[in-house]
Image: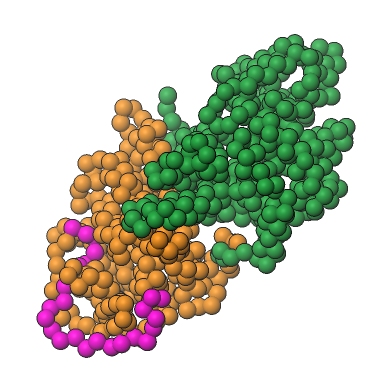
Chain colours: A green, B orange
């Protein structure tokens, strides 16, 4: 067991930080306050990601054949930490980098790979993820959006909800049912759908978490060529299980939490309010929550790096990450409430808005706890 | 960053696990329903086989020693392993063990009735002394440790040539490891219960309320263990205060839940749950308690003002 970084990892982190210091503009805080799914940040990502690509920092962990540098799992993870802590200047493109691209490499047809991967590697592709539906949230297999084969096309009808980035995305990584009833995982298929196709309507949902972050997406008699299918019919569940294994620990939120906590402490010190032992103790507790999350996540990364399945360790880590996000934002709400209003601190506000999502997006906290109970604690399946 | 043990550590923990599964380390009710089970035989077995000295072994080190404390503290028997494993090998290897560490001169001290040496860690230095049973007055206590106070006998203190701050930080890590291990032992005991015990026609462990709270406890205990191991390697004073503060803070809710889910059986001295929870109830206040350690971590990280 060794909790230190290798020289190579440290050098890579320094390289990413140098790049961010050089390339993030002076008004970045103003851009980021709109949120990763906003028009402002999406447009910025289309300027920023090509620069990352030129510096060979957009997809450094991808195979060289697809523009990558074959860097390690740890280096990929360090990249994610630094980007998220900086406010995720890659916007929606982090999904391409982390899982959509690698999924296409593994399961895509030659035509699909050629059509989509080079654009992703160049930093010029915006995708959205069409998973959740009004009646299929945590219970994703209950989805009802249906794709029916009609000659050499599929016709898609249904709707998706909470779709991040849908307003500006060019393509959707869509799950739709080609067979079976809601609840049947084996009847779900993946489609790579151009968002400009007739019959797709996107409505933005005003929300607490940033402008343009979440949407409803309606599919009415949307005709797409059968070649838009990824893998075979009914293979969606096994493919996304692979895809999301790359995302097992989710976003490295604790890194931003830790840095925001440091900023909050600095602000309190400036105001002379950090002498209070109660404030100090609460800051220490929030720090501990961040470090707890960090180590649990690192354990999962280490397992992935060594080709092992993290299984429930990933769920355990997710629980701690959610706690850390809330510990920091609650600390800010208790002792620096003014920074969340008016001309307050944009990074604190941005962190607060992300923290409220932490326990809901990508598998709710309670789902994680149920998985820990079953997989790690070997408790019987919950009865209804 | 590597979370897997090296080859020597793997072998070490395989053997330790075998020993932990042997007789002498398991649950047995104490005579006259005393609240702890001091296993002199198992303690001696570990000592004779050099387990308490593993921190001094290059390929095992302080991380393995801290992990061993975590493992041993999860047993229902009470072992003096924290000071012996994380202080003795590097600061006073020649002192006979078991050791008792005096934190607060006004309170009863755990392990004192079985200790052969005592330690005092002060701002101005570290002192040690050899003691005899006649120098100790055993004290009845709710906590699942042999507790005692020193009688008014003269004590021959020896000054230990060690940095008191370094000794103190190692002690902080040792307590955190022991507390995390005690919580782990209690959790395992309750898990066995809720898997088997049926009410309303189904196992208690199938109720979502119970599942979620035990899963939350498991996440905290896993995190506490990693914070302890990292602190044992780094010896960074922020890390040690963070580790102890974190596990002390978590212990309140965990101990509450463990007793809730064990129900009335957990109130008896026939069931071992108290062997873990009543160690945790004492350790939660060590070295300033949760608030004190959180504050200490904060001040060490960011300064006073």
The x and y percentages for residue B284 are 30, 57
**Residue drawn at 15 percent across, 70 percent down:** B138
| Residue B163 appears left or right of B40 | right
**Residue drawn at 46 percent across, 34 percent down:** A366
Q: Could you tell me if residue B6 is visible in this image?
A: yes
Q: Could you tell me if residue B48 is visible in this image?
A: no
**Residue drawn at 56 percent across, 51 percent down:** A255
| Residue B165 appears left or right of B270 | right
Q: Quadrant of the N terminus of chain A?
A: bottom right
Q: Nearer the viewer, residue A217 or A306?
A: A217
Q: Residue B162: say if magenta.
A: yes
The x and y percentages for residue A330 are 42, 42
| Residue B293 appears left or right of A130 | left
The x and y percentages for residue A234 are 71, 25
| Residue A162 appears left or right of B229 | right
Residue A98, quarter of picture: top right
The x and y percentages for residue A120 are 79, 39
What is the chief secondary structure element of the magenta stretch? loop
Residue B137, quarter of picture: bottom left
Instruction: Please state the extent of the stretch shown in magenta in the rendering.
Output: B142-166
Q: Residue B9: say if magenta.
A: no
Q: Up-down: is B109 above or below A338?
A: below
**Residue drawn at 34 percent across, 86 percent down:** B160
Q: Up-down: is A88 above or below B71?
A: above
Q: Nearer the viewer, residue A362 or A189?
A: A362
């Amino acid at each position: 067991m060794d909790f230190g970084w290798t020289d190579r990892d440290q050098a890579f982190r320094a390289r990413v930080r140098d790049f961010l210091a050089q390339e993030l503009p002076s008004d970045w805080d103003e851009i980021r306050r709109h949120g990763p799914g906003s028009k402002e940040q999406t447009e910025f990502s289309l300027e920023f990601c090509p620069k990352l690509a030129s510096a060979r920092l957009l997809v450094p962990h991808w195979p060289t054949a697809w523009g990558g540098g074959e860097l390690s799992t740890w280096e990929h993870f360090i990249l994610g930490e630094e980007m998220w802590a900086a406010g995720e200047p890659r916007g929606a493109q982090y999904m391409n980098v982390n899982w959509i691209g690698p999924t296409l490499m593994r399961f895509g047809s030659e035509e699909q790979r050629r059509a989509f991967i080079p654009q992703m590697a160049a930093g010029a592709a915006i995708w959205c993820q069409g998973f959740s539906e009004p009646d299929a949230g945590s219970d994703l297999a209950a989805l009802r959006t249906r794709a029916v084969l009609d000659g050499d096309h599929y016709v898609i009808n249904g709707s998706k909800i909470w779709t991040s980035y849908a307003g500006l995305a060019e393509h959707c990584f869509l799950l739709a049912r080609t067979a079976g009833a809601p609840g049947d995982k084996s009847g779900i298929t993946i489609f790579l759908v151009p968002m400009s196709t007739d019959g797709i309507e996107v409505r933005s949902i005003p929300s607490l978490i940033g402008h343009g972050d979440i949407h409803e997406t309606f599919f009415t008699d949307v005709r797409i060529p059968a070649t838009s299918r990824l893998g075979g019919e009914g293979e969606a569940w096994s493919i996304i299980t692979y895809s999301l294994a790359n995302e097992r620990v989710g976003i490295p939120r604790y890194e931003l939490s830790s840095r925001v906590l440091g900023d909050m402490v600095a602000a309190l010190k400036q105001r002379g309010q950090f002498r209070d032992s109660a404030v100090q103790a609460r800051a220490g507790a929030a720090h501990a929550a961040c470090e707890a999350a960090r180590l649990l996540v690192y354990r999962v990364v280490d397992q992935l790096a060594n080709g092992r399945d993290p299984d429930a360790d990933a769920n355990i880590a997710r629980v701690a990450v959610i706690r850390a996000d809330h510990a920091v934002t609650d600390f800010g709400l208790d002792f620096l409430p003014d920074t969340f209003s008016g001309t307050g601190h944009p990074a604190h506000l941005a962190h607060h808005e992300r923290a409220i999502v932490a326990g809901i997006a990508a598998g709710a906290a309670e789902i994680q706890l149920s998985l820990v109970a079953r997989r790690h604690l070997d408790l019987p399946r919950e009865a209804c | 960053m590597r979370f897997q043990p090296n080859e020597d550590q793997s072998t070490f923990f395989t053997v330790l696990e075998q020993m932990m599964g042997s007789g002498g380390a398991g649950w047995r009710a104490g005579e006259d329903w005393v609240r702890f089970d001091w296993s002199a035989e198992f303690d001696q077995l570990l000592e004779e086989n050099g387990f308490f000295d593993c921190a001094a072994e290059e390929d095992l080190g302080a991380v393995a020693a801290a992990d061993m404390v975590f493992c041993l503290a999860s047993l229902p028997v009470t072992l003096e392993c924290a000071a012996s494993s994380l202080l003795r090998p590097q600061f006073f290897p020649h002192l006979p063990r078991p050791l008792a560490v005096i934190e607060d001169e006004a309170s009863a001290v755990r392990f004192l009735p079985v200790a052969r040496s005592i330690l005092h860690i002060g701002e101005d230095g570290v002192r040690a002394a050899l003691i005899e049973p006649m120098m100790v007055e055993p004290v009845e206590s709710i906590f699942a440790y042999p507790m005692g106070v020193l009688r008014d006998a003269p004590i021959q203190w020896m000054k230990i040539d060690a940095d008191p701050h370094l000794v103190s930080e190692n002690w902080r890590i040792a307590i955190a490891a022991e507390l995390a291990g005690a919580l782990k032992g209690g959790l395992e005991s309750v898990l066995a219960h809720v898997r088997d015990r049926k009410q309303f026609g189904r196992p208690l462990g199938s109720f979502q309320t119970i599942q979620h709270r035990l899963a939350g406890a498991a996440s905290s205990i896993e995190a506490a263990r990693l914070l302890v191991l990292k602190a044992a390697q780094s010896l960074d004073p922020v890390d040690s205060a963070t580790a102890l503060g974190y596990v002390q803070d978590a212990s309140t809710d965990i101990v509450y839940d463990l007793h809730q889910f064990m129900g009335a059986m957990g109130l008896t001295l026939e069931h071992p749950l108290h062997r873990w929870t009543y160690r945790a109830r004492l350790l939660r206040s060590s070295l300033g308690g949760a608030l004190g350690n959180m504050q200490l971590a904060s001040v060490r990280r960011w300064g006073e003002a």
